[in-house]
């Protein structure tokens, strides 16, 4: 499958993407994960992205398009991909369209994960992430077996720098301003599929129905 997952921070894009990769060998491409590992490794890319990320703002379209142009040409994309957290702005969506047509790749659709703002706020405040493998936990309903330690890789499970209440509220504002317009954009391209995402299982079921897989 070749999908864009669209939705607010905390809508469940990452969890849904991981569940979908199990179905057909498609890979998850998360620009947030790519940027976080670059920050952690202290690369040039990481240095350029760090300040914006910490503040809950977007990094530049140019930087993101540079990353994605390379990433989409890697061999592991051949079986399909789930774009998680990209595109995030209209210019990124326009550039992505050009890039895909250049690479001869056709999308199955843009899955718009709908979740209410209350649910989103609650999820983000209680979310914890493994610094090593990116596995996502929730202190209320999905904590790691041993507090602060990843079940999968024994990495540290922490609250992200951009998941303080202040940064969360900033990220939601940025989403409303810069990313929500993509819904109308993809609707007019005939690619938008609205998905009720009350839970990731519900969302995955709806996406499977759309793709006619069981
Ligand atoms: P979220 O939980 O908000 O979906 P992500 O892990 O996708 O978080 O992104 C974390 C941060 O990385 C964003 O707040 C932003 O600073 C940066 N980022 C990720 N993807 C993009 C993108 N496509 N365009 C610009 N900035 C991005
Ligand atoms: Zn881990």
Image (cartoon, rainbow, N blue to C red):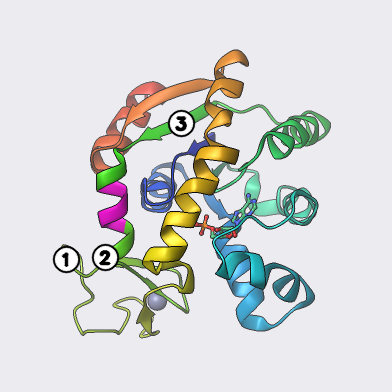
Nearest to viewer (mark 3 / mark 1) = 1
- Residue 162, above or below 150: above
Identify whether 198 is placed above or below 17: above
Q: Is mark 2 within 8 Å of ligand 1?
A: no
Residue 26 is at least partly visible in this image: no
Does label 1 or label 2 sit earlier along the sequence? 2
The answer to the question of whether label 1 and label 2 lie on touching residues, with beta carbons closer than 8 A, is yes
Chief SS of the magenta region = helix
Looking at the image, residue 135 lies above or below residue 59:
below
Q: Name the residue under label 1.
A: 140
Q: Do the residues labelled 3 and 2 touch (CB within 8 Å)?
A: no
- Residue 169 x/y as whole percent: 42, 55
Q: What element carries label 3?
A: strand
70 relative to 116 in the view: left or right: right
Q: Earlier in the sequence, mark 3 or mark 1?
A: 3
Q: Is residue 30 magenta?
A: no
- What residue is shown with label 2? 126
| Residue 27 x/y as whole percent | 53, 50
> Quarter for ligand 1?
bottom right
Badge 1 density bin: few <14, some 14–19, many ≥20, Cα 10 Å? few
Q: Residue at x 30, y 84 (%)?
A: 149
Estimate the spatial distance between the alpha carbons at disc 3 and disc 1, rounded to whole Å.
27 Å
Q: Could you tell me residue 58's position as x and y percent?
A: 63, 55
Residue 179: x %, y % from top left: 56, 38
């Amino acid at each position: 499958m070749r999908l864009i997952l669209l939705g607010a921070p905390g809508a469940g894009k990452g969890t849904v993407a991981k569940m979908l990769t199990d179905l057909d060998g498609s890979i998850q491409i998360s620009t947030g994960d790519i940027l976080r590992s670059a920050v952690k490794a202290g690369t040039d890319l990481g240095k350029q992205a760090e300040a914006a990320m910490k503040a809950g703002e977007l990094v530049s379209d140019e930087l993101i398009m540079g990353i994605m142009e390379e990433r989409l040409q890697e061999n592991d994309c051949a079986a399909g991909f789930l774009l998680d957290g990209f595109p995030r702005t209209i210019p990124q969506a326009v550039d992505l369209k050009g890039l895909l047509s250049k690479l001869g790749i056709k999308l199955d659709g843009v899955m718009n994960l709908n979740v209410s703002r209350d649910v989103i706020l609650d999820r983000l405040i209680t979310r914890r992430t493994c610094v090593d493998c990116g596995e996502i936990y929730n202190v209320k309903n999905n904590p790691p077996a041993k507090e602060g330690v990843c079940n999968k890789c024994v990495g540290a499970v922490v609250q992200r720098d951009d998941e303080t209440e202040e940064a969360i509220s900033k990220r939601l504002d940025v989403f409303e301003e810069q990313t929500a317009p993509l819904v109308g954009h993809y609707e007019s391209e005939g690619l938008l599929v609205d998905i009720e995402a009350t839970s990731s299982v519900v969302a995955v079921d709806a996406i499977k129905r759309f793709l006619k897989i069981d």
